[in-house]
Amino acid sequence: MKTRRLWIGFIAVITISFAVLLYYGREIYREAPPVPEKVVTVTGEVLFSGQEIKDGQNVWQSLGGQQVGTIWGHGAYQAPDWTADWLHREAVYMLDALAIASHGKSYDELEGDQQAALQVLLQKDLRTNTYDRETGVLTVSSLRAEAIAYNSRYYAGLFTDNPSMDHLREAYAIPANSLKDPERVHQLNAFFFWASWACVAQRPGQEISYTNNWPPEKLVANTPTGSMILWTGFSVILLLAGIGLMVWYYASTKEEEPIVAPPASPVANLAQTPSQRATLKYFIIVTFLILVQVVMGVVTAHYGVEGLGFYGIPLADWLPYSVSRTWHVQLAIFWIATSWLATGLYYAPTIVGKEPKFQKLGVDLLFYALLVIVLGSLAGQWMGIMQKLGLVENFWFGHQGYEYVDLGRFWQWFLFAGLFIWLFLMGRAIIPAIKQKAGNHHLLIMFLIACVAIALFYGAGLMWGRQTNLAIAEYWRWWVVHLWVEGFFEVFAVAVMSFLFVRLRLLRAQMATAAVLFTTIIFLSGGILGTFHHLYFTGTPTAIMAIGATFSALEVVPLVLVGYEAYDHMKLSRSSDWISSYKWPIYCFIAVAFWNLVGAGIFGFLINPPIALYYMQGLNTTPVHGHAALFGVYGILGIGLMLFVLRDMNTDLKWKDTWIKLAFWLINIGLLAMVTLSLLPIGLAQTVASVQEGLWFARSAEFMQQDYITVFKWLRVIGDTLFAIGTLALVWFVIGLKTGWSIEKRN
C-alpha cells in the first residue's frame, strides 16, 4: 500500500473520530445530571444546598475519591459502590415504612403481591424527576426525606467512629474518624445523595435514568434497557465481521520475506553521547519505582483480608488503603511513562546523527523535575487523605480523587510542563532528521506526531475544575486514561519499536513506515471513539452507549493478529548470534503481544459490551483487565524498552541470563496466576450476585467476607509472591549491570 494513501487514511481517521468525540462531549455537557440549587422537602425544608453537594464532591475527593469504593462504578473495589449502596438502603427504608403504614408489618413479612404493589409506589416516588430547571430546586417527598436522614446517620457513623460499625470499617478498609468535621460529613452525604439520585431519576422526556438505569437494582426498576441488548448484539456481530476481514486482508497482503540479519551489529561499539549516558539514572529510578509500586500492591491486596492492618500491624493508622492504592496506581503510570520517555531521550541523538546543543542539560533538568513531581505528589496525596489540607488546598496540592489522575492540580501542571520539555528535547532531534529527507523520514514524522500527542493529550486532565460536574470530569478523565495512556502511548511504542528495528537493519524503513501507519489507522479507528465504552453509565446520553459499543468492538480486531507479530519476533531473536544478545528485550515484546491479546483483547471485551458492563462495572472483572493490560502490555513493554537501551549502552558486554531469565518468567507467570486464581474467580462470583440481587449485594461486606471469597483473596498470594520475586530479580539484574554480577564477560 502506498504511503500517500496511508497518510490520507490516518488524517481521515483522526479528523472524523475527534469530530465525533468532541460533538458528543458537547452533548455530555448539555445533558449531564444537573446539580440543583437546593434540595427541599414538599414542606419547604432545605435538606442540602447546591454548594453543599459540590463541596461534598471535594470531601469525597479528599478521602481518596475513587480510591475508596466507587461512584457510578468507577474506582476501588474494597468498599461498596456508594451510589448503589445509598440507593438500596434508601429503597429498603422506604419500603419498610410503606409496609408498616399500610399493613402494620415489615416489607419482608408481606406476600409477593403486596410487595409488588409497594414497589410500584416506591418507583413512582424515586423515578419521577422532580427537578425544576427554572428554579433549580429538587423536591423530595417527606418519606424520601426520612430515608435521606436515615442514610445520612449511617454514613456519618461509618466515616467517623461509631463503635457498632467497627466491623464494617474493617471490611471496607476505612479507618475510624476518616472525617472529623461534622460539616464535612454532611457535605459528603449531600454528594452521595446527588450521585444516587442521578442513578434513578428519569431523564426529562425519557423512561431511563441519567445513568441509563445503572446500577442494577430491581426494587427501583433499574433494569437493562433495550438499547443495551441491541448494541451488545451489534458489537459482537461487528467484532466477528472485523476479525474475519482483518484475517483475510492480512493473509492476502502479507509478504513472507526471510529475515536476513547483518553479519554484525550495526550499533556495536558506537560512542555514547553525554545525554545518552545521562539517561541511565532514569532507568535506575524506574527499577526503584517498580519495586515500590509492587510493595504498595502487596499492601493493598492484603487489606482485602485484613482491612486495617498488615499481619497484625496497624498499618492503616499511617498508610490507609486509599493511600496505598493511590500510590500503587500512580507509580505504575510514573515508571511506565518514565521508561518510555527515557527511551526516546536515549535514541534522540541517533535520530539526527549528533548531540544537539545542551541536550544533556535538558535531560538532567527533566530528571530532577520528575523526582520533584513524584515525591511532591505522593506526599500531597498522603496529606490530603489524612485530612491535613483544606478542600481548596487538597485540589491543588493533595488528592483529586480521580483514578489514574489523582495527583493535585499543581503537580498536573508541573507534569504537563515537563512533557513539553521532553517534546522539545525530542523535537530538536527529530525535526532536523525529517528535513534531511532520508528514507525513514515518514517513520520519523509518525514518531514526532506520537511525541506531540503524548505531550498534548495529557492536557485533557486540566479540563475540569475543582467542582466540575462529575459526568463532565469523567469525560475528560477518560481522555487521559484511554486516549493518552492506552492510545497515543501505544502509537509511540509502535513507532519507537519500528525505529529500533530499522536502526538495527532488521526492518526496511519503507516497510516499517507502512506497518506503523497501517497499525495506527486500525488501532485508532476503534480506539478514539472506543473511549466511550468507559462512559455508558456516567450520566451520559444513550448515543454514547451506541458509539462506545460499536467502536470498542473494533479495538479488539487488530489484537487477534498479534500472534503473527510474536512469531516474527521469536524468529528474529534466533536469526543471528549478535541478535541473540537482544533476546530478553525481544522476549518482552513477545510477552506484550500475548498480553495484548489476552489482557487487552479477551479480558477487555469480556467487560466492554453494554449488557456485560451493566452487571460487571465496579466488580473485580475490571482489575482483571486493568492488571493484564496496564502491566501486561504497557508495563512489560516499558521493561522491554529499558532492557533494549541498557543493551545498547554496552554492546561489548555479554549478559548473564540467570537473573533476567528468572525475572521475565516469574513476572509473567505471577501476573497470570494473580489474575486467574484470584481476581477473575472473585469477579465472576460477583457478577452472578449482581445479576441475581444487584450491585449493592455484589459489593457488600456480607458477600465479600464469605469464606470462599476469602479463600480466593488468599490465593492471590501465589501470584503476588511469584511476581514480587520476579520484580526483585529484575532490580537485582539492573543493579548488577553496574556492579558486574549481571555481566559474564567481554565479547
Image (tube, rainbow, N blue to C red):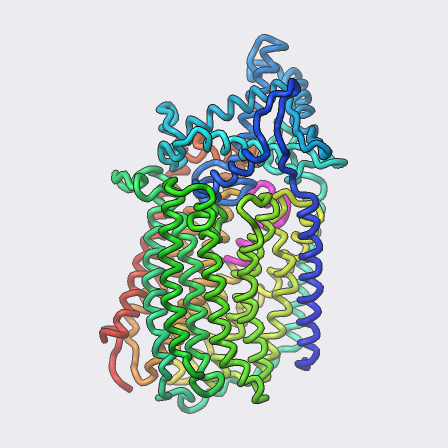
Camera-nearest residue between 165 and 702: 165
Q: In the displayed structure, would residue 395 be above or below residue 22?
A: above
Magenta span contains residue 601: yes
Measuring 50% from the left and 39% from the top, which residue is drawn there?
686
Q: In the displayed structure, would residue 641 be above or below residue 372?
A: below
State which quadrant residue 198 falls in.
top right
Q: Is residue 711 visible?
A: no
Q: Is residue 253 visible?
A: yes
* Residue located farthest toward the top when viewing the structure as drawn: 104
Residue 452 at what x, y percent from top left?
56, 70
Measuring 43% from the left and 64% from the top, which residue is drawn there?
636
In the drawing, does residue 179 fall left or right of residue 510? left
The number of numbered badges drawn on the structure is 0
Residue 417 at what x, y percent from top left?
48, 64
Prevailing secondary structure of the magenta residues: helix
Camera-nearest residue between 453 and 114: 453
The quadrant of the picture occupied by the C terminus is: bottom left
Q: In the displayed structure, would residue 95 be above or below residue 329?
A: above
Camera-nearest residue between 641 and 712: 641
Q: Which residues are magenta?
A: 599-617
Residue 459 at what x, y percent from top left?
55, 60
Measuring 68% from the left and 80% from the top, which residue is drawn there?
1
Magenta span contains residue 52: no
In the drawing, does residue 342 fall left or right of residue 94? left
* Residue located farthest toward the right when viewing the structure as drawn: 205
Residue 259 at what x, y percent from top left?
50, 84
